[in-house]
Amino acid sequence: MKKPILLICLFASFLPAFSQKKFTDKELATVVWAMGQMNPEGFTLRLSDLTQPKEGIMVSYGATQNSTDRKSIPAVIKHAKAHEGLVGGSLIPEDGTYYFDSTRPFPEDSLAAALAFARENGQKSVYVTSKDIHVKSNYEQKDIRIIYDCDMGSSTDDLFALMMLYRYMDMHRCTLLGVIVDRMDRANADAVDVMNNYYGYPDIPIGLETQGVEGPRVFIPYHNVAYARTPDAEPMFRRTVGDEGTYLDGYKLYRKLLAAQPDKSVTIASVGFLTCLARLMESGPDEYSPLSGLDLLQQKVKAIYLMGGVFGDSFEHDYNFTAAIRYSQVFFNKLPKDIDIVFSPGEVGDPLYYSAETIVNDMDWTDIHPIKWIYQFLNEDKFQKMWDPLAVIQAVEGDELFSLSERGWVELTPTGETLFTPDPKGNARYQLPGDARWSKAMLNYIRLMAIQH
């Protein structure tokens, strides 16, 4: 080990003992430089006591963003002292440059505000301390129009995927045009009505399947969340449609929504059965459009992000596709070849286990929350793998966060197996499993969205 590095390590080991000492700016500059040498992946340091914050969203000030050497650190310290007293360091992998910055902290439940401040200050990302993740802030404000198609009322990952969409709406990253529920039973649509109201989007339209899969398997029976009552027998959660209202048939809502959108402007995130999409494809002209459902789909939709599929060397049946095999066959056989489709196989989400205990703890900021109520009332602790949010995240974030297969074509066998044939001209790709660090980061991203309020 070279002598300067040894001295830095020895110096840093005594930092706790020095934390009560009043440091000069020159001494603080030496400490900050040492922290940068010891923490190549980044750090945040509180100048008042030389401790590192354990929580908070850290955002660099634009005023100090070009500080890349030891000589620039005094100016960073001066700015930090005039503001929140925090200094950070981070490595930018793209150019291998290490930056020192004066840092502003935000509460971890204030992601939208932190991202807005980051954009104002020209920062590419923010750092969430407790979850050890960077969240991109310099995203392009694209006009992303999404229809969310789910089998609400069984596995709770549908709820979290929908929650992600509301949070993306809060950050103006997408527009949720409507929610299609492809699991029959009014209660499942009522659960979406509760979610729309709770998250502040009461007027998002909801469609409900009426001719889909009879008696599909229910993993966690949470559809009765819409009818939860307080100790005074009052409804616990607000609803827009309510008990007296009605829902459009799922494929009809598809037709209504698509007909009103510009050509090739709609993204579909489908995380359940393919019943409503198949019925859309088989539909004819109606009061919403003179086009057939297939023509409407081809004209208006640019991409579909689909939770499902089993790829690689395994020949297994996919649950979502097999449960509604006739409809699934219609979808795969009729899907226009110019619509891009990205699959999110179950194995990608398998490591993202969100336990009931962690969910309840993450939502300790409120006593009244539909997802929290489900976990408290049902006391379930199974099937909380975050499969469905991955399709939604890629639909909004794009490909940057994911590793993907080459392009090709996907065929569905009569028994529900997905066969992939590579072809550079193909319309299909599928997500590849990430390593443990990637899986942890994705789960923490979902958790970060869960604590926003």
Image (spheres, rainbow, N blue to C red):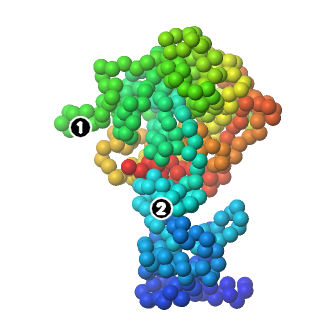
| Lateral position of residue 368 relative to residue 134, left or right | left
Residue 16 in the image: above or below residue 40: below
Of circles 2 and 1, which is in front? 2
Instruction: Look at the image and tell me whether residue 214 can be seen.
Output: no
- Residue 306 lies, with reference to residue 142, above or below; the image says above
Who comes first in sequence, dot 2 or dot 1?
A: 2
Q: Nearer the viewer, residue 426 or 415?
A: 426
Tell me the number on the disc at residue 57: 2
Badge 1 amino acid? Thr
Badge 1 element: loop
User: Where does residue 188 sit, x and y in percent of width and height?
Assistant: 41, 26
Q: Residues within 10 Å of mark 2 (few under 14, many from 20)?
A: many
Is 396 in front, or is 226? 396
Residue sitting at x 64%, y 67% = 91
The residue at the point 58 percent across, 73 percent down is 100
The amino acid pointed to by label 2 is Ile
Farthest-out residue, left: 232
**Position of residue 145 measured from the top left corner of the image (x, y, whole percent):** 54, 34
Residue beneath the point at 30% across and 34% down: 238
Residue that badge 1 annotates: 230
